[in-house]
Every structure is written in C-alpha cells, then in structure tokens.
Image (tube, rainbow, N blue to C red):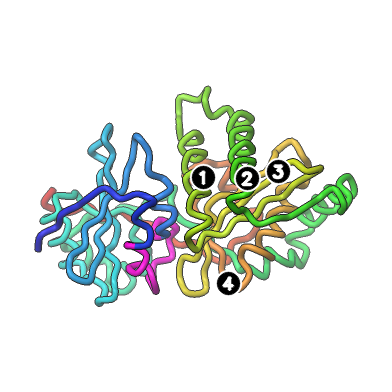
Amino acid sequence: MTCIFTRISISDYQRLFPFFVGQPYELCEYSLPGILAWSSASFYPCAAVVGARLILGAEYPGHPEYRHLLLPLGSVSEPTPRELAVVAAEAGYPGYWFVPQGYLDRYGFEEVAQFFAVVEQSGYHDYVYRVSDLAELKGNRYAKKRNLIKQFKQVHSQERLIFEPITIINTRQCIAFLEEWCEQEGCFQQSDSSLECEMEAAVNMLELVPRTAVRGLALRIDGVISALALASPLTEGMVVLQFQKACKTIKGLYQFFDRECARTLCQGFTWVNKESDMGRQGLAQAKRSYYPERMIRSYELRLHSV
C-alpha cells in the first residue's frame, strides 16, 4: 500500500465529499466542513486516497508529536485493528486520534490493544442531544432556560428581532460579529490562541456555506447581527452544530437563539452533536445544563511499534 498525502483545503470539498456520504462515526471530527475549516498556520489536514478509502491525516508544523490519523472512510468495509496498524505504520504516523467508543465496542478492547495503546481523550467526548428536547425545552429540568428566554423576550419585542439564513449577502456582517465576539472574549490577549483559531475556523466555514451542505442562521437585534450558528450533517439522523456564538452581554440571548437553532438548523434530524468541552470546566457545565442524551467517547490509538 502506498499513501501519498497532500494538503487539503476548502477547494477540495467536492472531491472529498463522496467519501463522507454515509460515514458512520458520530464524533464531530468526522465532519468534512469542520476538517477543512480548522486549517491554519499551526495545523493543516492532509489526505491520501488508497483504492476506495480516504485516509485523513493531521499535521502540526510546530508540534510534530501531535501528528495523527483519523479512521479511514469510504464505501469499503471498516478496517480492522490490524489493518489500521498497517496503514499507520506505512503512512509514517504514530497512530489515530478521535476513535469513537463504538469502534472499540465492535472489535473489543483486547483485539485493539494487540496493536495499539488505547488512551482516553477525556476533553474530547462529544455531547449529543435529542433535537426535540432543545427545540421544545419541556419539563422541570429546562425551567431555568425557559425563564431566561421569557426575560429576553420581555426586553426584546418581536419586531426588533429578525432570523435569517447565512448567505453570501450577509457574510461580511457575520465576520464583523465574529471579530466583535473575539474582542469580547479577549482572543488576542490570551497566551492560549485557541479562541483566535476558533474564530478563524468560523470565518473559513462561512466560505463553505454557499456551495456545501453547511447551513447557517443569524439573529439580528435592531438590525445588527448579535448571534450566529453554523451546522452540517454528520451521520444519518445527526447534525453537528459546529459554531454557535451570541453576544454574552444580552441576558437570555443564548438560550433564545439556541432554541431557534434546534428548530431551524437541526430540522429534519433526530440528534444534534454539540461537540466536546475541550476540558474547559465552564464549557462543560454549560453543555451539561442542557442534559445531553448521551456522550460519544473519544480515544487515541498509539501504535505499539512507534
């Protein structure tokens, strides 16, 4: 097997998309728009096509120890742990990141452990919710969310609010909102550049909206974009909500906007993946407050011979 990896970008979307049709993995890292959007100076994705399989790699110019593969995709049968080990060794990668729990369940821990050290990626377990729960917010457990929405609507009358799809027409205003959000969050003052990278990825994904399955929703308050979200299909029945930002100084706005995202962006899907908390306690608390139906656990597989 010969793997010739090339760097991939947004312009490769149409060429790569067929490999993602019907892909089974429920971790957000298996979203093609997400893979392409997060490309930056510190990280870039690459890919090799071997027969009917797409092999995806991640390169970190400043941190080669982070190099990894994702599970191969394609119309052929899922690779066994032995086959994964052969692919990683011949491709020159130390192993795989973002391997969902389901893969380990199908082949068994002992089988996988013959070829890899299995390491849990505790900050990268994805939160999955039932769309109807977030769209309706029924029951006592969502009482606080409904109360915050009520407070928001008491201050902001309906005529002040406009929901609109994100299109090429309002992209510039969406970028301006993201820049303002980044300024509020102190992106450029932090030694950790993760928020700045997140903004860059969101801007990249806006570029995908007109020509891909990515859908976007924006909310204007008094004519000014004050919240936006971007989502794309992940698996059959599941959508991934990849970016969701709202002006944090407006009480109840996030809860109001989140409910509309479930009703609009997630329409037609049973499940919504809201990605991981990346080990941030505040983010984890916020995600848990919406009562996920389940978690998709993520693992790293480190090749024994490396």
Of residue 103 and residue 23, the one placed in the foreground of this image is 23
Considering only vertical position in the picture, is 164 above or below 294?
Answer: above
Of mark 1 and mark 3, the one earlier in the sequence is 1
Numbered badge on residue 269: 4
Placement of the N terminus among the 4 image quadrants: bottom left
**Three-letter amino acid code at the position of disc 1:** Ala
Report the mark closest to the observer, 1 or 4: 1
Mark pair 1, 3: CA separation: 15 Å
Mark pair 4, 3: CA separation: 26 Å
Of mark 4 and mark 3, the one earlier in the sequence is 3
Numbered badge on residue 202: 1
Of mark 2 and mark 1, the one earlier in the sequence is 1
Mark pair 2, 4: CA separation: 21 Å
The answer to whether mark 2 and mark 4 are in CB contact below 8 A is no
Report the mark closest to the observer, 3 or 2: 3
Question: What secondary structure is found at the residue carrying circle 4?
Answer: loop
Magenta range: 15-30
Of residue 36 and residue 235, the one placed in the foreground of this image is 36
Numbered badge on residue 225: 3
Q: Locate residue 47, reporting x and y percent.
A: 25, 55
Of residue 157 and residue 93, the one placed in the foreground of this image is 157
